[in-house]
């Protein structure tokens, strides 16, 4: 029975900077609760602020007043591919839920994971044979 | 000076199944050379066939007579995100080159890597705090 | 309480290609149930087929009409070593069970894990000191 | 001969936000050159800003007007332990250099890496045996 | 419900070398129980001895009659940073508990994890851009 | 051009405990030189001793007066599978060389890497779907 190693901050008891960030998270992500991840980070308010600011800028660029050349689904697909590669269960659950909200169906989800799985395989093979790059990559 | 741990198969000297697969790789990927990765795998022809068949099906579905709900750029973005997460240099070089061929610009490439980097951070945080999933994920 | 992010396919309700592959899995692996892994992959039948074909070829070569120079126990030992390194709990459980079926005792299992653990240590040391290869590896 | 997959931004040609951040990096880190890492990130100025702001806040808290309960050496030791675990060669070189500037001697560096190596071993063992936590961790 | 893949050795039933090591673990670590990790390793007594000897030497140098230039808290911080990076839940729980015993507060714990998270991010970025070292590291 | 972050200890200039261990390494491994890995560890003699003692016990049990139920080739295969999974280039080169000395041919080497690659794929899939164990593993 694994459990968080810190006591999660209670959103109802939070004040000041933490309260503001919790509100911004719920508003930006259109959620009616504060996910456990942010409640854990809130035990260190500086860290909460740093991670949220970065995540908001990269994953919710429209809320951060920034243009992005990637669409929201592609951004969440990257998050899921990374999380599956790292085997982070909280993250896999969270990004799968986000992709479902964005309308991904089970078969497409399977395609994302199949490709992530495939390149975990080829990564191990390329590293296992110590293969050198074919050509210098195109520098711009 | 790291180098491949096997002698790469010379495409000009290859025959039989290996020759056919090399030709299929160049035709499918529109390349005029056989990448080192495939030349290394060809030292074990069974393995070459298995990996190529899977990669062709998932990454070149149109050539494999299969419908995909992901576009080619998204598929390569998954490959790059996984490769950056694993720190596989051959793979990073190869998938960056593929994304360039698909027309990605440096700023968008940076956005992909920024998001991959961000979730490597949040993965470590979620694991480091042992945070439990918020809710049961939506089963379809 | 982590749980699968997709609804597992019910073997009794499966038809067509999925049904055939489920039967092949149980027959090849001498199991009287379909493991959850395959029931999850079956949500994307193409992926189920790709992964099973590859796994059958590499791990059950006799069923795939292929000669292998590795014995079944060595093959499962590789699987366990990789799974322990990646910290994949489903995979560790599954390959430990497979090794038990092949007759491995607890002490030998411990030796496998001890060696896997040792090289996770030396890998971190070699990378932490950025040590260069001693000699060019012997090319055949 | 692996090389960066993007053309590094020339500090002498940089202007605007990039120029300001480059100056802040050199001033904060007391360097007379801009490390390649930042020159690569600068191809995507938004990303450069996000990563630098975060790194400055966490690693140079005094410059960011923030109190830290960890001393500079401990902070760099964490960076090196993570980098050795991930096998990131640029990062290992960079954080080893930073620790040298902070006065660490070779034997202490070895002790850091020995401990990092040890826990890469025990991590693989704990995962390889799928050991459950002993007790609920002390919540504060 | 994941569980250990081996039956944990019962400390009360242990004899000989295992009993001696269990006692040494409890005495050295000032614990009144034998953690599950050591009870699992004890299924292979040689392995138990090897890992304990190494861990005692590195993490409890005073008990091993050895001088260390790192303080106990720094040593545990390295352990936690590595464990968070690898996503090893048993290890994260165990090293968080050890740091609590050493008096770390929640905010400092958060700072450790924030730094570990940050460098998992920069590692992925440095690998994702394939950035080369700036300068040859200073050899002593 | 990455290079070791410490000055490798010159075997000809080594004395005392380091000299003895270097001799034991060359004798046990039947080598006429001291690999760079050990020359780097020797910058911290305690660490050199700890790692060598453990590696000798596990990988050269006959020299350490210990029975092993695994044969030398299986032990090196585990080492290679772990090293390919971690992408540790020094380690891949070293264990490939060791397997060559033990007589492995290129095709069998390919089979080892193919299986390691396959399970890096399935690990990512099992983690990406968060699949739960099928059954409680058989406790002995």
Image (cartoon, coloured by chain):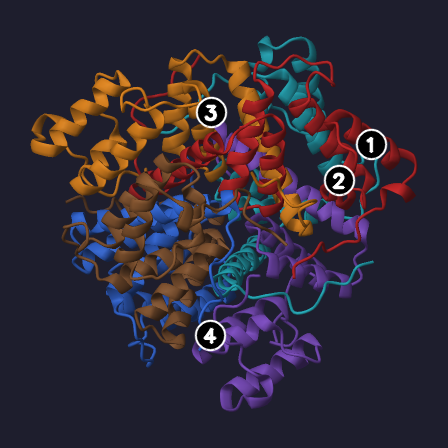
Chain colours: A purple, B cyan, C red, D blue, E brown, F orange
Residues indicated by labels 1 and 2 sit on the same polypeptide chain: yes
Vertical comparison of D26 with C49: above or below: below
Is the C-beta separation of discs 1 and 4 under 8 Å?
A: no
- Report x, y in % for residue B130: 52, 63
Query: How much space separates mark 1 and mark 2, taking CA atoms?
Result: 9 Å
Disc on res. C38: 2
Residue at image location 53% in from the left, 29% down from the top:
C77
Query: How much space separates mark 3 and mark 4, taking CA atoms?
Result: 43 Å
- For disc 4, the chain is D
- Report x, y in % for residue D91: 36, 51
Is the C-beta separation of discs 2 and 3 under 8 Å?
A: no
- Report x, y in % for residue E38: 40, 48
The residue labelled by disc 3 is F77
The residue labelled by disc 1 is C21
- Secondary structure under tag 3 reads helix
The residue labelled by disc 4 is D139
Image quarter (top left, top right, bottom left or bottom right) of the C terminus of chain C: top left
Is the C-beta separation of discs 4 and 2 under 8 Å?
A: no
């Amino acid at each position: 029975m694994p459990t968080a190693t810190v006591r999660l901050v209670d959103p109802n008891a939070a004040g000041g900077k933490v309260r503001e960030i919790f509100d911004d998270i719920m508003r930006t992500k259109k959620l009616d609760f504060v996910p456990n991840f942010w409640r854990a980070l809130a035990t260190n308010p500086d860290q909460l602020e740093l991670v949220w600011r970065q995540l908001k800028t990269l994953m919710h660029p429209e809320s951060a007043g920034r243009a992005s050349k990637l669409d929201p689904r592609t951004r969440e697909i990257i998050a899921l591919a990374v999380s599956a590669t790292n085997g982070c269960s909280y993250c896999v659950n969270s990004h799968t839920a986000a992709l479902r909200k964005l309308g991904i169906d089970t078969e497409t989800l399977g395609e994302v994971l199949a490709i992530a799985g495939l390149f975990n395989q080829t990564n191990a093979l390329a590293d296992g044979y110590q293969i050198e790059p074919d050509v210098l990559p195109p520098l711009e």
